[in-house]
Amino acid sequence: MSSFGSLFRVSTFGESHCAGVGCIVDGVPPRMQLTEADIQVQLDRRRPGQAGAGSISTGRNEADAVQILSGTEKGFTLGTPIGLFVRNKDMRPNDYGDMSQVPRPSHADFTYQMKYGFRASSGGGRSSARETIGRVAAGAIAEKWLKEKYGIEIVSWVSSVGDVVCPESEINLETLSRDQVDQHMVRCPHIPTAEKMTECIKAARADEDSIGGVVSVVMRNVPVGLGEPCFDKLEAMMAHAMMSIPATKGFEIGSGFKGTEMRGSKHNDMFVIDKEGKMVTETNYSGGVQGGISNGMPIVLRLAFKPPATIGKAQPTADFTGQATSLAAKGRHDPCVVPRAIPIVETMAALVLADACLMQEARVASAVKLPEEVSQYFCDASMDGSVSFNGVVKGWPGMDKDLQKKQVEKRKAELEEELKNLSLILEGGGAAAQ
């Protein structure tokens, strides 16, 4: 289907060579400042040719300028559906004339034809990566809200191209920024490795071929409690989102497949109380998710992207009549998709987190108060990792008294600030009434 999400929901539309592409975003909280410029940043990162990357990406030249059609007024969200549209301009359907009767090997031409009995004859239609413009636009809204509401940061980077792998020791997950990622056109923050990746991509293109790679992503400051077991566990929804991106062939979280080589005594993430009195883990083999629910640690994912199917190198295949033929694809295509996949991965992660946050916010807000005598069995549903009962901060049993006092004082300051703001509102209302 073309819709994703439950409370924060996006429906995308459009094909590679139609009038344009876009989406409808439902569930965006009201009164958030939002303009086209907020969305355009990620769309520009998705465009080909960014940071001088024309030599390693498609030659299609699109401005990808987004237009907000609905859902905002005076630069603020209304809480109603937001319509977004990006016009297609640089289409060349004639490039696909010779391929209309020959399904591209490992492409969606054959399966779309068999499923629907008809298909978009040029550009790949809905299977084209151009469809991801709607996702990126919607996800840009999601990540803006997540940053303002929770301080969530999402950073993705290219961790391998072909057999060129970025050393994990060269990536600091706590400080890695998008500026660091974007400083090189291949979007690997370790420059020596990025140069080798670039040569790998250029070599594939020179041979009229393509190459795959791996994209990694880290999500920091994610609230505790996100994910809906059993079937909508957080990692399950992340896998759903990521594997819906064109050309993805593999998904890992935390230790991933390498974790199968470890013993449990090594793989277990031991709990400790940090300096702020919150429960954290000493290691993060879980990748920030345990039991399908976020535990407050950074969420770390890896996505495998296959080599693009459309290549200029002639290959023996068969046409739709079953006759043997040779196909050397024409048109403008990426020799490697991973550099341009970075904003797509980030925004799909944002869509999952925004949906999960709205669900958990509803659960926290709807919790009922309980008698004090049952406090030893319960604690309030939480998104910040603190321990409270009926709104009163208690801290973890056995917590250091100074840490517990610090948490209580922090909560007291927050309540005093809320009371101060309420007083100002009342005073302003009284003055207006006179």
Image (cartoon, rainbow, N blue to C red):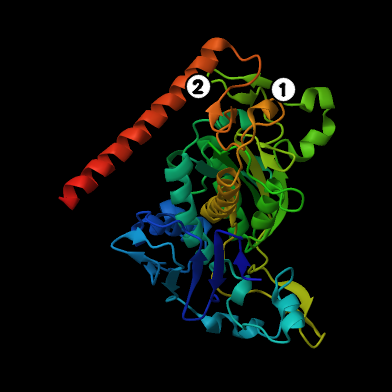
Q: Residues within 10 Å of mark 1 (few under 14, many from 20)?
A: few
Is residue 182 visible in this depiction of the protein? no
Which of the 4 image quadrants contains residue 5? bottom right
The residue tagged 1 is: 270
The residue tagged 2 is: 407
Furthest residue in direction top, as rendered: 401
- Res 99 label: none
Quadrant holding the N terminus: bottom right
Residue name at image x 49 percent, y 54 percent: 142
241 vs 88, nearest the viewer: 241
Q: Amino acid at mark 2?
A: Gln
Q: x%, y% of residue 344? A: 55, 56
Mark 1, mark 2: which one is toward the viewer?
A: 2
Q: Is residue 42 above or below residue 390?
A: below
Q: Is 387 situated left or right of 175 in this image? A: right
Is residue 222 visible in this depiction of the protein? yes
Q: Residues within 10 Å of mark 2 (few under 14, many from 20)?
A: many
For numbered disc 1, what is the local secondary structure? loop
Which of the two discs, 1 and 2, labels the residue nearer the N terminus?
1
Q: Is residue 282 above or below residue 77?
A: above
Q: x%, y% of residue 229? A: 74, 48
Residue name at image x 79 percent, y 23 percent: 266
